Structure formats: structure tokens, C-alpha cells
Amino acid sequence: MVVCRTPPAQGGGSLRILTPLLLLASAASLHAAKIPAPPACGKPQQLNRIVGGEDSTDAEWPWVVSIQKNRTHHCAGSLLTSRWVVTAAHCFKGTLNKPSQFSVLLGAWQLGNPGPRSQEVGIAWVQSHPVYSWEEGSRADIALVRLEHSIHFSERILPICLPDASVRLSPNMRCWIAGWGSIHDGVPLPHPQTLQKLEVPIIDSEVCSLLYWRGAGQGAITEDMLCAGYLEGQRDACLGDSGGPLMCQVEGTWLLAGIISWGEGCAERDRPGVYISLAAHRSWVMRIVQGVQLRGHSQGNGPTRGTGPSRGRVR
């Protein structure tokens, strides 16, 4: 375009000077094109939703990924940047040093019909949190997955934001979880395995601590855990949903509030879902992942209620 809009050179000398300048400009443009700015996090480009339903819509949660083990869905995760996914550490118990067994499927709304716009990428390595103990219900059940190569963003593949220090998750705030896990205990999601979603309220941490109190000073809920769901049961995450996101919307942007970690059974009464808080581990994630985006409340605004999919036992 630059060449077409340049008037003809008057004489060979001018042409010799102009040509290298144009080449330099073209080279600079090509270099810039290779490093595009990442898309805004937490902003799906298609927002139509099935209210009160279970199936999500195509591209509704473009950061939710399927972590596959030997080509079969194993856990879920959330895309942070073009090279990093965050998930639950327990998904890699006994296989942390065997990344070749795993791959990440992005942009697949239905696992049974991922479509030509999905992308599957191998895993280079996995970094689990250094204090995770590899025991069920352990604190710091979080791991960062490094992809073998950068993925291409699209309307079906976008990053989610992390909450900044301004975000507080108040009890009864409505958030969402999503995943391809079992629809009942022992009942896998049927073909074509459409991504499921569920709205869940945040549960007061003291209430949750009492529900999971083990007696004799044994508290199951640690300071980096949060709970969400329904005390009456019936709606919950389940096996295969592990590592997936607890997502809360703040001022029009989706934030990754937590990671599906554990629970007792699936959808049992007084046994809500337990999640690892991203706010508690934000600094650790940011030390490892370059380019992760943070969002929260704008200065001067009052608190914003979350809006906006299901979880399991070490799930």
C-alpha cells in the first residue's frame, strides 16, 4: 500500500534512496505483524446464552480447555496466554514428568465434534505449586501448563483474566463453572459431549469450614480455598471437571476466581464444591507466566456483583 501511494520518483538517484526506505518500512511492518497484541482477556465475542440450561453455547467460554490424557478427556483448564494454561495439580498425580501423555484441546465446544477451528497442542512441561502435597484435598492444588508452541487466538480461543487486588468475592455472589465431567456420579457426559455450565453462588468461608470440619481441630478448608454451590446438593461439578474454572464477572469482564479442586461425592447435601483461590496464588502465577492480564474494579466504583458454569471430587 505504501508503494502505490508514493508519487513516481524524479530521477534514478531518488529512486535508489526511496527503495531501501520502503523496504525498511515493509520489514518493520512484517515484524510488527508477527507479534500482535494479545486480545483482551475475559471478553467472549459471542455472548448469547441459554438461561437456566445446562449446555453452553459455542464460544461462550473461549478460555475453557480440555486436558487430554492419551487422547481422552482427563481434566479441564483455563487459558491465560498464548502459551500457558492453569489447572489443578492433582490432574498430574504420578505423571508430572510424563508430559508426552498429555495434550491440550482448545476451542472445542463439543469434544465429540471439536470442529476444524479447534486446536490441539502438546504439553512441554507442567509446573505444580511447590507446597502441593499430592494428597486429596491438599492446599495449593494448582499447576501451570506450558504448551509446546503458541496457539492462535480466535473467537473460540481467548484468554481469561486473573482478579487483581481490588476484587472481593462476597457470599452469595453469583459465579459460573464449566466442564465436560460426569453428569452424575459414575455417569459420563454423553456424546457429543457438549461443554456444560452451571451458575453457583459463593458460600461464606466460615460456613464452608463448618460443613467440612473433621473434628479434633482438623479443618479441611485452608486459607487458599473457597467454596461455591448449593447446600441442598443436586447441582455440582463431578469427576472430569477438575482443573476447570470458577468464573465471576466484574464490570463486564470474566475473571478466573478459582480452580475446581475437590469435594465429597457429587452434588451431595452440605458438600459444596471446593476451589483453589486464584487471588491466593496470583503472585506465584505472575512470577512464572509472562503476559497474564489482571482486571478488577475501576477506581471510584462500588462493588459489582458477579454473573455469568459444574465441578467434582478430586474431580
Image (tube, grey):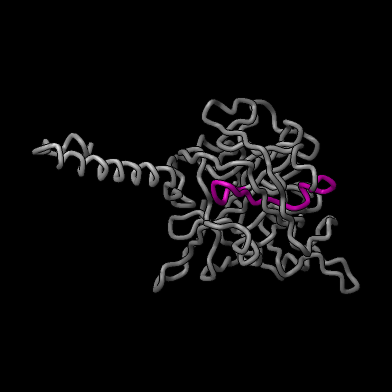
At x 37%, y 41%, the residue is: 30
Q: Residue furthest right?
A: 216
Question: Does residue 262 lie above or below 15 as drawn?
Answer: below
Question: Per the image, is 28 magenta?
Answer: no
Q: Is residue 224 left or right of residue 32?
A: right
Query: Which residues, given as a range, are shown in magenta?
Result: 78-96
Question: Does residue 99 lie above or below 253 as drawn?
Answer: above
At x 91%, y 73%, the residue is: 216
Q: Is residue 24 left or right of residue 235?
A: left
Residue 48: x and y in percent read: 44, 39
User: Is residue 32 in view from this perspective?
Assistant: yes
Question: Per the image, is 82 magenta?
Answer: yes
Label total for image: 0
User: Is residue 50 in view from this perspective?
Assistant: no
Residue 217: x and y in percent read: 87, 74
Q: Nearer the viewer, residue 103 or 113?
A: 103
Residue 209: x and y in percent read: 76, 67
